[in-house]
C-alpha cells in the first residue's frame, strides 16, 4: 500500500492519471478501490463535500432506501459484510451515509478523492490517446481513461415557475436538502410533487406544519413499507447465508433483489386466491409486493387486477372519498413508474392540517411573494418544498461538456436519446466508461448489485488491456445500434412504455422519450456481459496506439 501511495503521489504531481473518475458515491468509491488494486493512479472528483453520492444530497425528512438494508450494501468484502450492523429493515438516509463514510475510512479512500470540485468538460485527444479533463476552477488534468460514476438520480430538477424569485419564504428541493435540520413547526408549507421523495417526507412534514398543502399533478402507487427494527436473529441469518443470497441476487433475479418469484401469473388464480395473495403481499410490504405474481408488468389484464386492489386500499384508508379518488392513480399500470414505499402516506390526508390540491387540470399559475396561486386562489405558505424529481439517467452527464471524435459532444450524439453498448460505453468516445448508464439494468435494479457488476467488468477489462498491451477500447457502432434496438425490443414486450415516467425522460420538457434502462433482468444482463468479455470483448474495437504507430512507420 505504501508503494501504491508513493506512485500515486508521483504521478499526480504531473497532473496525469491513469484514470479520472467523476463522482464519489457508491460507484466511485468501489471503483477507486478496485483500480487501486490494479496499481493504477486514480483521481476522483466529487462536487459534494463528502462521499455518498445520492445519500449525501438527499437529506429530506423520511429519506430512506426502498431496498431492504441487508441487500442494499456492498458484497465485495466479506469482513465488511460481517462487521456492519444495519438497524432497520429499510435503512434511513443518515445511516446509509454513515455506512458510506465507514467504507471510505475503512479502505482509506479519501486521499485520492478531491471534494468540492466539479468537472466542467472532458475532451478526447486522438493524437495522444488521452482525455483532457477541465475542472470547475479551470484547471486541466489528463487521463488515459475517463469514467462517469455520476449516478442516475443526482441532477435535481427545479421547475421554472413564474414568480419563483419573488417568494419571500424559504424554498427547498428534496434532492438538495440543507445539511442542518429544517424545522417546519408552526409553519404553513407547500409540497409540490407526489413522487417517492414527497411520499416519504409528507407524513413527517405534516406532523410539524400548522398547515400543509400538497400540490399533486400525477398520483403514484405506493405500498406500505412496514419498516421495523432489525433483530439480531434476522441480521445473523442474512450474514450466515450471504454467499448464496448474493449469488441469487446477481444471477437469478430480475432486479438484483432476493425475493421469491412465483411461477404463476395473476389470472392463473381464482379471484378469491388472487385477493388472498395480494393481501399477503400488502402485509409483507415494500417493493416485494410487485412480485406477488410473475407477470404484473407484462400483462395488462393481470396488472389491472393489482391496480384495482391498491386503489381499493387507498379508498379504505382515506376518509374523504373525493380525496381518495384524487390519490388513486389511473393513468399508468402499477409498477411502470417506480413503485413507492411509504409509512402512513395515505393516512396523512385524514389530518385536519393537510389539504390536497389537484394541479393536473388547474395548473400552478405562479409563485407569489406569499405563496402559490392555482386557478386564481392563492395558497399562502411560509415554505415551499419542491419534490419535483430528477433529470434521470442522463442529466448528470449532460451537465459536462464531453467531446469525442470530431469534437462531437455527447449531448449532440444523444440528442434523440442515449445510445450505448451494454450501458457501459458509447461509440466515438474511446476509453470512456459509464457506471450503470442507460442501456443497463441501472435504476430497475438494486443499484449496488449493478454498480459492483459494472465496476468489476470495467476493471477486469482494463486489466485485460494492460496485459495484452492495448491502450484503447471503443464500441463498434453496429454493436451499439443492435444493443439499443434490443433494449427497446425487450421494453416493448412489457407495460413500462405505457407510463410517462422518468424511465422514459417524460418528466423533463423537451427530453427525448425513450425507455432508458435495460429490462431484460440483472441475471440475463450479467451473463451477456460475461459472454462479451469471454469472446475477446466482442462488439468493441481494441487497439494499441504504439502498435498502430509502428505499422504506420513501416
Image (spheres, rainbow, N blue to C red):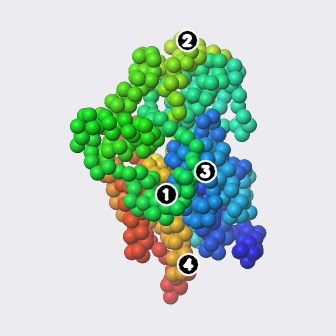
Q: Residues within 10 Å of mark 4 (few under 14, many from 20)?
A: few
Secondary structure at numbered mark 3 = loop
Marks 2/1: CA–CA distance: 47 Å
The residue lying at 27 percent from left, 45 percent from top is 265
The numbered mark, 2 or 3, whose residue comes first in the sequence reads: 3
Q: Is residue 34 left or right of residue 443?
A: right
State which quadrant residue 248 falls in. bottom left
Cα distance between the residues tagged 3 and 1: 21 Å
**Residue underneath mark 4:** 466
Provide the secondary structure element on which disc 4 rests: helix
Label 2 packing within 10 angstroms: few (<14), some (14-19), many (20+)? few
Earlier residue among tags 4 and 2: 2
User: Which label lies toward us, 1 or 4?
Assistant: 1
* Closest to the observer, 364 or 447: 447
Residue under label 3:
86
Q: CA distance from mark 4 to mark 2?
A: 66 Å
Q: Relative to 416, is 483 above or below?
A: below
Give residue 450's mark. 1
Residue 128 horizontal/vertical position (percent): 60, 72
Q: Is residue 180 left or right of residue 24?
A: right
- Disc assigned to residue 377: 2
Residue shown at 55% from the left, 49% from the top: 69
Q: Kindly report which numbered mark, 2 or 1, lies closer to the viewer in this rendering.
A: 1
Instruction: Return the residue found at the far front.
Output: 233
How dense is the environment of label 3, judged by Cα within 10 Å: few (below 14), some, or many (20 and up)?
many
Q: Residue 407 falls in which quadrant of the image?
A: bottom right
Q: Earlier in the sequence, mark 3 or mark 1?
A: 3
State the quadrant of the N terminus: bottom right
Q: Secondary structure at mark 1?
A: helix
Find the distance from the CA under tag 4 to the CA under tag 3: 39 Å
Amino acid at each position: 500500500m505504501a508503494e501504491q501511495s508513493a506512485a500515486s503521489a508521483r504521478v499526480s504531481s504531473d497532473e496525469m492519471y491513469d484514470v479520472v473518475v467523476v463522482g464519489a458515491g457508491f460507484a466511485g468509491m468501489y471503483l477507486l478501490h478496485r483500480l487501486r488494486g490494479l496499481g493504477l493512479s486514480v483521481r476522483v472528483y466529487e462536487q459534494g463535500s463528502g462521499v455518498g453520492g445520492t445519500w449525501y444530497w438527499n437529506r429530506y425528512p423520511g429519506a430512506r432506501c426502498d431496498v431492504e438494508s441487508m441487500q442494499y450494501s456492498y458484497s465485495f468484502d466479506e469482513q465488511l459484510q460481517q462487521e456492519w450492523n444495519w438497524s432497520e429493515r429499510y435503512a434511513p438516509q443518515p445511516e446509509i451515509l454513515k455506512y458510506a463514510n465507514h467504507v471510505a475510512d475503512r479502505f482509506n479512500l479519501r486521499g485520492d478523492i478531491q471534494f468540492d470540485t466539479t468537472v466542467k468538460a472532458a475532451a478526447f485527444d486522438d493524437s495522444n490517446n488521452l482525455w483532457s479533463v477541465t475542472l470547475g476552477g479551470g484547471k486541466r488534468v489528463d487521463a488515459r481513461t475517463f469514467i462517469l460514476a455520476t449516478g442516475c438520480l443526482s441532477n435535481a430538477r427545479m421547475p421554472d415557475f413564474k414568480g419563483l424569485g419573488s417568494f419571500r419564504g424559504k424554498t427547498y428541493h428534496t434532492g438538495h436538502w440543507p445539511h442542518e435540520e429544517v424545522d417546519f413547526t408552526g409553519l404553513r408549507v407547500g409540497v409540490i410533487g407526489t413522487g417517492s421523495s414527497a411520499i416519504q417526507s409528507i407524513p413527517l412534514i405534516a406532523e410539524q406544519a400548522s398547515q400543509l398543502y400538497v400540490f399533486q399533478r400525477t398520483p403514484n402507487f405506493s405500498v406500505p413499507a412496514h419498516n421495523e427494527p432489525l433483530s439480531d436473529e434476522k441480521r445473523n441469518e442474512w450474514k450466515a447465508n450471504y454467499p448464496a443470497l448474493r449469488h441469487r441476487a446477481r444471477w437469478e433475479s430480475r432486479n438484483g433483489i432476493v425475493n421469491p418469484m412465483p411461477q404463476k401469473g395473476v389470472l392463473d388464480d381464482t379471484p378469491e386466491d388472487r385477493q388472498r395473495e395480494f393481501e399477503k403481499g400488502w402485509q409483507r410490504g415494500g417493493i416485494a409486493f410487485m412480485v406477488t405474481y410473475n407477470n404484473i408488468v407484462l400483462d395488462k389484464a393481470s396488472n389491472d387486477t393489482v391496480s384495482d386492489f391498491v386503489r381499493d386500499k387507498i379508498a379504505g384508508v382515506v376518509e374523504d372519498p373525493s380525496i381518495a379518488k384524487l390519490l388513486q392513480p389511473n393513468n399508468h399500470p402499477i409498477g411502470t413508474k417506480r413503485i413507492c414505499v411509504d409509512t402512513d402516506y395515505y393516512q396523512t390526508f385524514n389530518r385536519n392540517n393537510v389539504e390536497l390540491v389537484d394541479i393536473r387540470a388547474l395548473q400552478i399559475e405562479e409563485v407569489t411573494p406569499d405563496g402559490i396561486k392555482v386557478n386564481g386562489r392563492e395558497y399562502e405558505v411560509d415554505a415551499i418544498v419542491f419534490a419535483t424529481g430528477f433529470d434521470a439517467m442522463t442529466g448528470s452527464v449532460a451537465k459536462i461538456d464531453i467531446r469525442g471524435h470530431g469534437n462531437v459532444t455527447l449531448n449532440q450524439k444523444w440528442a434523440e436519446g442515449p445510445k450505448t453498448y451494454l450501458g457501459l460505453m458509447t461509440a466515438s468516445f474511446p476509453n470512456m466508461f459509464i457506471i450503470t448508464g442507460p442501456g443497463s439494468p441501472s435504476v430497475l435494479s438494486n443499484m449496488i448489485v449493478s454498480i459492483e457488476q459494472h465496476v468489476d467488468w470495467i476493471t477486469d477489462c482494463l486489466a485485460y488491456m494492460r496485459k495484452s498491451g492495448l491502450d484503447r477500447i471503443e464500441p463498434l457502432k453496429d454493436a451499439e445500434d443492435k444493443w439499443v434496438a434490443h433494449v427497446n425490443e425487450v421494453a416493448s414486450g412489457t407495460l413500462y412504455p405505457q407510463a410517462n415516467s422518468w424511465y422514459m425522460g417524460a418528466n423533463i420538457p423537451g427530453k427525448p422519450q425513450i425507455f432508458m434502462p435495460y429490462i431484460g433482468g440483472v441475471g440475463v444482463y450479467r451473463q451477456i456481459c460475461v459472454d462479451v468479455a469471454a469472446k475477446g470483448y466482442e462488439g468493441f474495437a481494441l487497439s494499441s496506439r504504439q502498435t498502430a504507430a509502428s505499422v504506420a512507420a513501416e
